[in-house]
Every structure is written in structure tokens, then in C-alpha cells.
Amino acid sequence: MATELKVPALGESISEAVVLEWLVAEGDRVEVDQDVVVLETDKITINVPATVGGVLVEKRAKVQDEVSIGMVIAIIDEAAEGGGGEKKAEAASGDDAAPKQAAAEKSEAPAASAPKEAAKAPAEAASAHGDGDAPLMPAVRRLIAENGLDAKKIKGTGPGGRILKEDVLRALEGEKPDTRPAATSEKPAPPMTAASLGPKPAAAADEGEEIVKMSKLRRTIAERLVEAQRTAAILTTFNEVDMTAVKALRAEYQDAFSKKYGVRLGFLSFFAKAVIEALKAYPAVNAEIRGDSVVYKNHYHIGVAVGGGRGLVVPVVRHADRMSLADFEKTLNGLADKAKSNSLSLEDLTGGTFTISNGGVYGSMLSTPILNAPQSGILGLHKIQDRPVAIDGKVEIRPMMYLALSYDHRIIDGREAVSFLVRVKECIEDPSRILLEI
């Protein structure tokens, strides 16, 4: 019995996706709930599992193909027997499978057997599995074989520890093995490079240029950033904050905090608490424009921009106002780990009311962050830098940070924006305000 594998519902407002990676080959046997294919949407990447156990006899979409919800992307035969991609002909349903195979064997030129035998050794040298039990994609397996690498020595960063092409490239950067495929009657193909592994250029490029098609995720990010600048009246106001008090607090209690809660006490939890106090005082910054109305939010879902496995994402810490510093740190660490492993769910990325972006971790001194629509405010944090400042008529060296608040001037007045940022500054410079909520 043949069962169709269809693109599942991907969440509100998402109607299509791109095939990012096939996790099994045609002819492979799959079990119920085993991940078969990875799809990328404009918000998340999602693994699509098999709905039945059987043999994957047909793929109806290639990598980089755009697919829509409900579209059939593969056929699984529950009655077929299979065990590997090389058994595709045996697993394919239909009475003409055997004649086709016989015809294919008959039509092969005798000279082709020599290259096949020569290429067999490196292909067998690469294990079908890498780190753990995660199967290797054919392209990855071929790349490992052509460069004489040991799959067991390559650390996989994909879902479930799967080895990705990027992992192999990193391994190649670290070691340059001399092992090459055995000599054949044909010139062996050169090892793959980062350029050859990416999407093929859409057109011929001039010398020194490389044209690579943007991923759907990157295209959507670009469109939304442009749309935010086109539709919102974005202004940015700046201030600076003395981090002395927070740094001293962290230094004094870091060990006890880490021992009790199992996480480190970071700066972001302080800023999140400070932001919430400021949002309560100036609710327009926590609002959004919806049609011809302004929607004021009485909840505080704080988005935090983090570097994910496939780019910058903004997971959301829900009801952050109800959390302690430890709860916020634990939740944020969990979301960051999911971002790095590309396992964020749609719920993790939606519903934010305000965003914090910390460019300081990359060394940024000052920036003007762009709104994360439909939100009306985003706070940019920057590098902590020792600078001379005037304190009570004396010059002292203090750890200072520039703050930047970008806001939608359509609903937030300059007075509110400046006052909001001043409230954040006051809470950070005197953390007791956060505890007392004043």
C-alpha cells in the first residue's frame, strides 16, 4: 500500500516552504515518526516525519523546490522491502520495475564498469552514518569519500547530530588529507568547495564574483526589513548607561546564583526587567498599530535577537514580567540552544510585544536597530567600554554602554521614547529599582 507524504500545516500565515534537505534516500526504509525531510519557511525550519512505516519509493520534490501546504512530496510503500538507496529499483512499485532495471543494465557500456569499480572504494570508506546514528545525505557521503575523511571524526551540527556539508567543509579547513580516489580511466572529480555546494548561480558571473540565490528565510527577512522601514516612521533616540552597579552585583553573586539555579546571571535578564518597568510606565512603546487602531498590550512577551544555526532569529520569552531573573535566564538559554540547533517552533518566534537586540556581543559600539514589525519599539544594547565620565565633579573611569531605542513615531512621541530610555537607564544604574518596581 502506497501512502502519500504531504507538506503539513506550518502555522498561521505560512502557506509555503522550501525543501532544505532530504534525510533519507529513495529506497531507504523509514519507521513511523522518523524524520524524512527538512522544510524551511520564512520563520522556522521544520522536520517532517513519516506517517507510516515502509520504504520511501519516490521523492516528488528536490532540494530548493518550493512546496505548499498539502502538496505530496514523497511516496512511502508500506508493503515494500528496502534498506538503502541502492535498492530503489527493488522498492519501486509497479510491474515494470524489473524490466527497467534489466534494460538499464543492458544499456550500460562495458567501459563504464571500470570507473564504477574505482569509485566504489572511497564510497564504501565513508560510513552511511556519521556521529551517532544520524544518516548521511548522499552529497555529504560523497564529499567525505572524495576527500578521504573519516565520518566518525566529524562533529555534526545538524538535527540529531547529523553531519551537514558545512561540517565537512570545516573539517577540510582543519586538515588536508592526501588520500584520493583510486586512479581510473577517467579524470577524478575535484573535491567540492563551499562555492560548489551552494545553490547554482542563476547567471554567469564576472571574474571575482559569485551569484548565489537567497534562501527563502533570507528573502523574507529582507522583505520585512524593507517593509518595516517603508511603513513605519522609525526614529532612534540614544542614551548611555553606567554598568558599574550591575557588574558589581553579578561579580558578588555569580557563583551562588549559578550553583543554585544552574545558569549564569547575565546582563540580558537585568535589561529585560528594566524594559518591563519602562513599558509599564509608557504603554505606547508596548503597543502596535492594527489597521486604523492602536492596540495596547497588557502582557509582556520580550523577543531577544540571537544568532541561530541559519541566521538571526528573535525567539520570544513569554510573560517575562512574571519571571525571576533565574527563570528568564533559563528560558532564554533554552531558546538560544533551540535556535542553534534549528529546532525553534513557530510558537517560539511569534507573539512578541517588544524586542531587545544585543549587538554588543559582536563588538558593536553603536547602532540604530530596525523595528521587528508589528512591534513599535526595539532596544539596542552595545559593547561595555571603560570610558572617563564626570562623577560629582570628578573624572572617573566607568564601564559604560550606549543604548539605542528605535520606535514608531506614528504612535510614540519623542517625549515618551526619551522618557522610556531614561527609565531603563535608571533601573540598570540602580538595580534596586527593579526589585522595588519604582
Image (cartoon, helix red, strand yellow):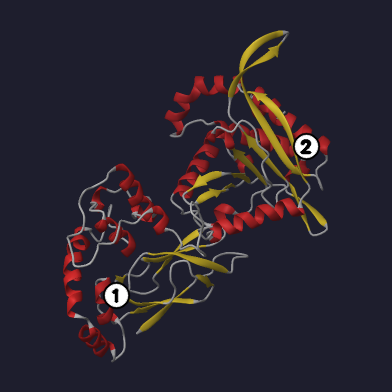
Visible residue check, residue 433: no
Image depth: mark 1 or mark 2 in front = 1
Residue 305 occupies quadrant: top right
Residue drawn at point x = 50 percent, y = 63 percent: 204
Q: CA distance from mark 1 to mark 2?
A: 60 Å
- Find out whether the residues at labels 1 and 2 contact each other: C-beta distance under 8 Å: no
In what element is the residue under mark 1? Answer: loop
Which residue is tagged 2? Answer: 417
Tag 1: amino acid: Gly
Q: Amino acid at mark 2?
A: Ala
Q: How many marks?
A: 2
Q: Nearer the viewer, residue 157 or 301?
A: 157
Callout 1 environment at 10 Å: few (<14), some (14 to 19), or many (20+)?
many
Q: Which quadrant, please, contains the N terminus?
A: bottom left
The structure residue drawn at horizontal position 64% and vertical position 32%, both measured from the top left corner, is: 366
Residue 415 makes an appearance in the image: yes
Label 2, secondary structure: give it: helix
**Picture coordinates of residue 267, whole percent (x, y):** 56, 31
Where residue 189 appears, as percent x and y from the top left, is: 28, 61
**Numbered mark located on residue 281 in the image:** none
Q: Quadrant of residue 183?
A: bottom left
Comparing 374 with 254, the one in front is 374
Compared to 296, does 393 lie above or below?
above
Give the residue at x 28% y 60%.
141
Q: Which residue is mark 1?
A: 27
Left or right of 152 in this view: 5:
right
Percent coordinates x, y for residue 335 in the rendering: 50, 46
Q: Residue at x 66, y 33 (%)?
A: 274
